[in-house]
Image (cartoon, grey):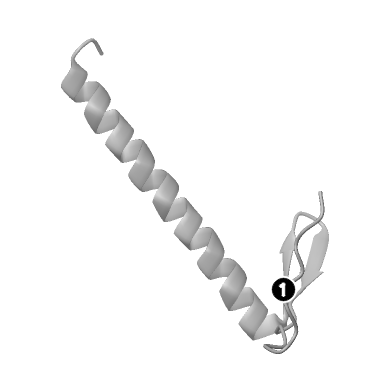
Amino acid sequence: MNDPFIWFIAIIVLLVALSFGWIQAHSTVAAECERLGAFYVGKTVYECRPQDQKTPHKEARP
């Protein structure tokens, strides 16, 4: 893989795959939240609640 064009194509394919994975993950979480009101990662279940538009968004704490 010494040809720069091959590296360019490989990077493009990688970026497209990462973008597709990111979009798919967010779509899955959104669908599960709408359908079940929760989603899971491993054995942990996270509940989804709609945010009240009048209350300000709380910043995540480290």
> Could you say where residue 6 lies in the image, as x and y percent from the top left?
21, 23
Q: Quadrant of residue 52?
A: bottom right
* Residue 41 drawn above or below residue 28: above
Image quadrant assignment for residue 30: bottom right
Furthest-top residue in this view: 2
At 81% from the left edge and 55% from the top edge, which residue is drawn?
Answer: 61
Q: Secondary structure at mark 1?
A: loop
Relative to 5, residue 25 above or below = below
Task: Quadrant for residue 35, please give it.
Answer: bottom right
Observer-nearest residue: 15 or 54?
A: 54
Q: Nearer the viewer, residue 54 or 23?
A: 54
Q: Is residue 34 above or below residue 22?
A: below
| Residue depicted at x 32% and y 32% | 11
Question: Which residue is at the front of the view, 60 or 43?
Answer: 60
Amino acid type indicated by mark 1: His
How many residues crowd mark 1 within 10 Å: few (<14), some (14–19), many (20+)?
few
Q: Quadrant of the N terminus?
A: top left
Where is residue 32? Give x, y as percent: 63, 75
Tally of numbered discs: 1
- Could you tell me which residue is drawn at 47 percent across and 52 percent down? 21
In the rendering, at what x and y percent does residue 47 appear? 79, 74
- What residue did someone put label 1 on? 57
Residue 51 location in percent, x, y?
Answer: 71, 83
